[in-house]
Image (cartoon, rainbow, N blue to C red):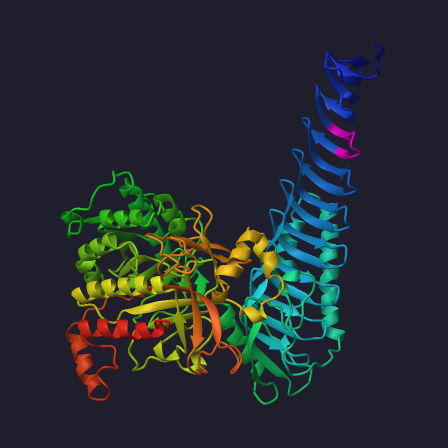
């Protein structure tokens, strides 16, 4: 062993440790301190700074595999700024924390792909730019190593896609601008166009500020500038500026070429490599303007896609022949793509009402949950079955301080609704987090016909509706029988109620709420919604009022639905039982809310379906069984496996038997989407057949597609209208002008019979 006195007073010497490792360098006492080299028995070598036996400061590590690191260390971990060269030839330069990439950094992968942006625990997360070896690039938000959030994709052929992304796939509102000058604005679902959109041909009026997503130019740039690594941030900002300038220059100088007015060829959106001129989408902001390049008589097309397949296209109108047509088209799209809901923000008219509702529900559920679960008693329904509490802003002995306004809270029949939530397997903590968590509720932009306002939890599991005083009385009156009916029939289609509350504000204003299950809480996109009563008077929707979010009516329905015979029998058995219950309570004006998810027709599906099936975990054996046993249906039905399927938000009850598949319980497998548990009214596969032309609601071009595979969601809603004196008067008055059997207001017995008869025509028996 060699020993040498250094100028710093530390002892520099080399030593072979008992475990075979070798250290040569400075010591402080008996521990490495200062600069030194350490070699492990496996050949790993470190040379750099030490601080009381731990690698701390600047240093370099070389592994036997050929990988190396040069940069900062702290406490024995790679921590700070440094460069890592992988054995596969990859190179990372940037920030580290506890041996993981964390912060700002640039990665050059072995296949020549590059990523420059933010990292979190070893994965891209935050804002960044990824450039593939072939030149395609994505700039925007990331989460857990995948494109997630707002971002822009740019292909080498000049196409750009500004869209919301989820798990690496375009999902939500999007805008695609093509190199030809055309653009498409619409909706995406898991990487495929799905729903309504607008296609602007080259030379037509289009939004002028869609070259770069707003999130790229504002939010993420500011977040990048606030990072600690100033030099790396400056490089990213320079990169962003160049990218923005490049796209804007293209929009100014590009002379688009014309294309034919016909439908552009179909394209497999799922390839992820490039886009055709009919296959992309993107959102617009509220202040978008439109530019006119002086070319007249260029059509704008209104399109509809199902699972990436173009099924409908019609001209929107001539630019030159319609004053401010661009603005009108923008407004129409915003109504469709923006959806009927808006998140409640601070300053919103319902903001304090939302805070009060969340405070009250949190208090009530927290108070009732510790009480041991027991059978409901008669006094749990009575007028004394109430929880009342005052919530002052400053707080009280029983309530926390809050930033809303003072209010009085009343909770009706808490033990009854607690048991109802238990019946539908709703965990108390999940219930509170869904409604009362950090996220705001969403409010429907327009109230219902009755004047009620609807709110939706952020996870969309629960709908909250304001009630009139008369509706509250009806609900409380029928609650004992409702409770017994729901308990007796697991598969009831009647609205599921989970809580009834009242808020009293300063001045005596009272707002009553009911919390219900959202029957459309599903991963599948609902393409059509119908409210079906069985009456004909006034049961159609004006053409000019229809958009993607419209709930259509009886006369708008141009399809009938064929379902498996056992399913149809079970469905109408339950409908009859539910109608008998409503008739016993003298309830009318209820309706069947029908949601339809359309699958792309099999003869138009892209070649990616097999690959999507494999990605969904479906084996070749399952695919073979599907093709042999149930391919005529267009669906794959496999034996139910608990824990592997996606159910509804509050599914309960037995599963229905599939006669063709031969299983007692079945799951519905949708390639590229997932595996869904089939129950009565939830995830029900069916075949939709067009029985008449209806331009109001027609899904496809005339004389093209006559049948669709669909997934159905249905339930009986609006069950709080009694057949009272006012309804009797309405029936008498309308009967003078219209056929008495065609109007909605009829006696409960007639209403139930007509309701069932109409639904039997919607779901006819198969030959």
Residue 411 percent location from the top left of the image: 25, 51
Tell me where residue 135 appears, x and y as whole percent.
76, 59
Q: Residue at x 48, y 74 (%)?
A: 707
Residue 393 appears in the picture as rendered: no
Q: Which image quadrant for residue 568?
A: bottom left
Residues in magenta?
Answer: 57-71
Vertical placement of 187 versus 515: above or below? below
Name the magenta segment's main secondary structure: strand
Frontmost residue, 690 versus 408: 690
Q: Is residue 734 left or right of residue 701?
A: left
Left or right: 721, with 317 as reference point: left
Judged left or right of residue 14, residue 660 is left
Q: How many marks?
A: 0
Q: Residue 70 in magenta?
A: yes
Q: Position of residue 184 (x, y in %)?
A: 61, 72
Residue 55 versus residue 645: which sits nearer the camera? 645
Looking at the figure, which quarter contains the N terminus?
top right
Residue nearest the viewer, comparing 363 with 346: 363
What x and y, as percent, mark residue 267? 65, 69
Residue drawn at 16 percent across, 80 percent down: 729
Q: Is residue 92 at all visible to an observer of this figure? A: yes
Q: Residue at x 51, y 58 (%)?
A: 626
Q: Residue at x 74, y 56 (%)?
A: 239
Question: Per the image, is 236 magenta?
Answer: no
Q: Tell me where residue 485 sits by quadrant.
A: bottom left
Quarter of the picture holding the C terminus? bottom left
Examine the rendered structure and indicate whether residue 399 appears above or below residue 589: above
């Amino acid at each position: 062993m060699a020993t040498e006195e250094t100028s710093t007073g530390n002892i520099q010497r080399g030593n072979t440790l008992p475990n075979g490792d070798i250290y040569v360098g400075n010591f402080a006492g008996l521990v490495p301190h200062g600069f030194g080299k350490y070699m492990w028995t496996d050949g790993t070598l470190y040379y750099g700074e030490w601080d009381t036996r731990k690698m701390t400061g600047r240093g370099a590590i070389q592994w036997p595999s050929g990988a190396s690191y040069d940069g900062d260390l702290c406490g024995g971990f790679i921590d700070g700024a440094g460069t890592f060269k992988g054995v596969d030839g990859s190179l990372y330069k940037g920030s580290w924390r506890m041996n993981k990439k964390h912060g700002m950094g640039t990665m050059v992968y072995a296949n020549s792909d590059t990523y420059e942006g933010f990292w979190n625990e070893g994965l891209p997360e935050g804002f960044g730019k990824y450039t593939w070896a072939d030149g395609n690039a994505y700039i925007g938000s990331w989460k857990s190593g995948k494109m997630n959030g707002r971002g822009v994709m740019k292909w080498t052929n000049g196409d750009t896609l500004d869209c919301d992304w989820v798990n690496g796939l375009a999902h939500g509102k999007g805008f695609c601008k093509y190199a030809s000058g055309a653009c498409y604005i619409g909706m995406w679902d898991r990487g495929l166009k799905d729903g309504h959109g607008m296609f602007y041909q080259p030379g037509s009026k289009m939004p002028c500020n869609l070259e770069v997503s707003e999130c790229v130019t504002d939010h993420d740039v500011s977040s990048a500038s606030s990072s600690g690594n100033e030099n790396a941030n400056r490089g990213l900002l320079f990169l962003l500026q160049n990218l923005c300038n490049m796209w804007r220059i293209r929009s100014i100088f590009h002379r688009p070429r014309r294309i034919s007015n016909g439908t552009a060829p179909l394209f497999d959106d799922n390839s992820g490599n490039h886009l055709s001129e009919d296959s992309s989408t993107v959102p617009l902001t509220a202040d978008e303007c439109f530019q006119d390049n002086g070319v007249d008589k260029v059509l704008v097309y209104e399109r509809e896609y199902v699972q990436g397949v173009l099924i409908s296209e019609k001209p929107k109108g001539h630019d030159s022949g319609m004053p401010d047509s661009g603005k009108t088209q923008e407004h129409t799209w915003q109504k469709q793509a923006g959806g009927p809901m808006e998140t409640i923000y601070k300053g919103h008219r319902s903001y304090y009402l939302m805070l009060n509702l969340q405070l009250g529900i949190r208090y009530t559920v927290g108070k009732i949950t510790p009480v041991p679960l027991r059978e409901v008693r008669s006094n749990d329904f009575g007028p004394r079955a109430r929880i009342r509490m005052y919530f002052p802003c400053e707080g009280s002995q029983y309530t926390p301080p809050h930033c809303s306004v003072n209010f009085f809270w009343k909770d009706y029949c808490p033990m009854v609704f607690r048991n109802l939530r238990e019946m539908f397997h709703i965990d108390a903590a999940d219930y509170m987090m869904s409604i009362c968590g950090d996220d705001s509720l969403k409010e429907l932009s327009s109230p219902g016909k009755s004047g009620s306002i609807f709110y939706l939890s952020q996870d969309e599991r629960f709908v909250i509706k304001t009630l009139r005083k008369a509706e509250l009385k009806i609900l409380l009156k029928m609650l004992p029988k409702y409770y017994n009916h729901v308990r007796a029939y697991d598969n009831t289609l009647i609205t599921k109620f989970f809580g009834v509350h009242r808020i009293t504000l300063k001045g005596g204003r009272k707002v009553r709420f009911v919390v219900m299950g959202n029957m459309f809480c599903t991963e599948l996109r609902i393409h059509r919604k119908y409210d079906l009563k069985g009456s004909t008077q006034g049961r159609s929707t004006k053409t000019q009022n229809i958009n993607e979010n419209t709930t259509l009516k009886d006369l708008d329905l141009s399809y009938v639905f064929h379902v498996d015979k056992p399913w149809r029998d079970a469905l109408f058995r339950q409908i009859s039982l539910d109608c008998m219950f409503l008739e016993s309570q003298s309830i009318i004006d209820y309706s069947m809310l029908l949601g339809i998810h359309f699958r792309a027709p099999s003869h138009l599906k892209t070649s990616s379906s097999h690959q999507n099936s494999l990605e969904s975990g479906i084996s070749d054996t399952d695919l073979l069984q599907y093709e042999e046993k149930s391919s005529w249906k267009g669906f794959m039905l496999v034996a139910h496996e608990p824990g592997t399927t996606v159910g509804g938000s509050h599914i309960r009850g037995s599963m229905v038997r599939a006669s063709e598949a031969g299983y007692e319980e079945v799951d519905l497998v949708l390639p590229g989407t997932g595996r869904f548990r089939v129950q009565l009214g939830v995830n029900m596969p069916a075949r939709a057949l067009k029985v008449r032309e209806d331009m109001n609601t027609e899904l496809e071009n005339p004389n093209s597609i006559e049948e669709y595979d669909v997934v159905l969601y249905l339930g009986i809603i609006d069950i709080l209208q009694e057949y009272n004196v006012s309804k009797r008067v309405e029936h008498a008055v309308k009967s003078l002008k219209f056929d008495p059997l065609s109007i909605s207001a009829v006696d409960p017995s007639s209403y139930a019979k007509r309701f069932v008869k109409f639904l039997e025509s919607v779901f006819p028996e198969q030959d």
